[in-house]
Amino acid sequence: MKSHPTFEKLRIFAPGPTPVPEGVLAVLAKSPLHHRTKEFIEVLGRVRENLSFVFQTKQPSYVLAASGTGAMEAVIVNLFAAGDEVLTINGGKFGERWGKLATSFGLKPTILNVEWGRAVDPDEIKRTLKANPKIRAVLFQASETSTGVYHPVEAIAKTVRENSDALIIVDAITALGVNDLPMDKWGLDAVVSGSQKALMLPPGLAFLALSERAQEHRKRANIPNFYFNLKAEDKAATTGETAWTPAVSLISGLDLVLLRMKESGLPAIFSYYSKLAEATRRGVKAMGLELFPKDTPSNALTAVLVPPSIPEGKKIVSHLRDRYGITVAGGQDAWKGKMFRLAHLGFYDELDMITILSATELTLRHLGHKCELGKGVGAAEQYFLENNS
Ligand SMILES: Cc1ncc(COP(=O)(O)O)c(C=O)c1O
C-alpha cells in the first residue's frame, strides 16, 4: 500500500539532500541570469559576504559548482605540496574520504582511526602530532554523517594550536548552519560545506573559507589542478565574478536562504536544531532503541541502532520508503542493515520530527519490534512542549 491512493507523497529525512523551502523553489524556477551581468554580480557579491557571515569569518568565501567533496578536493590541491604529511581522522565514511583524497593527490596521510560511533579524543591527536612533527594539517569532520557523531571541534582546534603549527581543516558539510563553528574565533584554517544540507538547497554548490594562515600555505602548493584552482577564482573575484560558469540558479536560491538565515540570527538557528535533535533522540529512545553514537551526537542527524528484534535491518529503510514514501539513510559499510539515520538539519520543523518518529514507530511495529505506539512521538512532543513556548 502506498501513502496516498493517487499520488505518492514523498518525504526526505536523509541527511542530505534535504527539503527545499517553497520560496527557494520559486527562485530556482526563474530564468537563470547570465553570469557576467551586473544583476548576477550583485547577487554573487551578497552571497559571498553572507556566506562569510555563516562561516563566522572576516575572510572571503568561495562558491564552487560541485558537491561538497569538490570543496574538500579544493582544499587539498590548493594548500599542499606533493609529499606533505597530514593527519586525517577516520571515524567514519567521510573521515575516510579525507585520507583517500590526500593519498590520491600524493600527500602522506597519517590516519588516526577512531571506532565508528566514537568522537576523536584530542589527546590522541596531541600524541600523534608529537610523534610526527612534520604534519602540516589535521583534517577531520565536525559532524561525521555516517555515524551521527560530533567531533569536538573547539577542543581539537585548541589542541592542534597548542601542540603544532598544523592547519586545522574542518569538513562542516553537515555542521555549517547547525552547530556553532566560529571559524575566526576558534582559529579554524579551512572550513568546507555544501548546499544540500543545512543550507536547504538542491545539491550542486560547494563552499569554502580559508584563514590568513591557510592563504599563506597556498604559496607553496604544487598539486596539479585546474577546475578547483583558487588563483583563478581570486582573479575572477576582483571583478565580482567566478572563474567558470557558476551554478547561477542555485546561487540565486542561496541568496534568499542566506538573507533569511541572517535575519534569524545564528544563535537562534543553532538552538533550534539542538532542540529538534534532542526531541528526536528522546523519541527513538522511548521506542526502546539505542543511539549509535557513544559520544556527543551530531545535531544534524540521529543515527540509531537496529534493534535485535528486527534481524533484517534494511527492511526499516525499505518499509519507510515503500509504505510511507519516506527516505531515510541506512548504515554504511560494516553497519549496512544494522543502523538507520534520521535527519533534522535543514528545512524541518517540530511536526516533521513527529511525523518521522510516528512512521518509525509504525514501521518498527510492522517489523515485529514490541514498542508501545505513541511512546516515541509522545516523548518528542513532551520535550517540544516543555522547551518551545
Ligand atoms: C560530513 C560529510 N562530508 C562529505 C560529504 C560529501 O559531500 P557530497 O556528497 O556533497 O560530495 C558528505 C555527504 O553527505 C558529508 O555528510
Image (tube, rainbow, N blue to C red):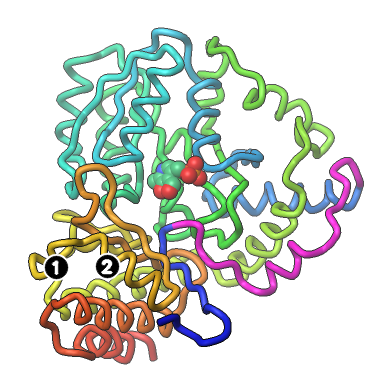
- Which residue is depicted at the point 24% across and 50% down? 336
Q: Is residue 139 magenta?
A: no
- The magenta span reads 16-37
Prevalent SS, magenta region? loop
Left or right of 324: which side holds 258?
Answer: right
- Which residue is depicted at the point 64% across and 38% down? 64
Give the image location of residue 25, x and y in percent: 69, 68
Q: Earlier in the sequence, mark 1 or mark 2?
A: 1
User: Is the CB of mark 2 within 8 Å of ligand 1?
Assistant: no
Q: Is residue 31 magenta?
A: yes
Query: Ligand 1 shows up in which quadrant of the image?
Result: top left
Tell me the crowding category of disc 2: few under 14, some 14 to 19, or many 20 or more residues within 10 angstroms, Cα based: many
Instruction: Name the kind of residue labelled 2 in the image.
Output: Ile
Is residue 185 visible from the viewing direction of this image? Answer: no
Give the image location of residue 289, x and y in percent: 14, 71
Give the image location of residue 384, x and y in percent: 33, 86
The residue that label 2 is drawn on is 316
Q: Is residue 277 above or below residue 196?
A: below
Q: Is residue 178 above or below residue 97?
A: below
Residue projecting furthest to the right: 37
Quadrant assignment for the C terminus: bottom left
- Is label 2 in a helix, a strand or a loop? helix
Q: Is residue 332 above or below residue 379?
A: above
- Is label 1 in a helix, a strand or a loop? loop
* Disc marking residue 262: none
- Find out whether the residues at labels 1 and 2 contact each other: C-beta distance under 8 Å: yes
Q: CA distance from mark 1 to mark 2?
A: 9 Å
Residue toward you, 89 or 339? 339
Residue toward you, 178 or 320? 320
The residue that label 1 is drawn on is 310
Instruction: Name the kind of residue labelled 1 in the image.
Output: Ile
Residue projecting furthest to the left: 308
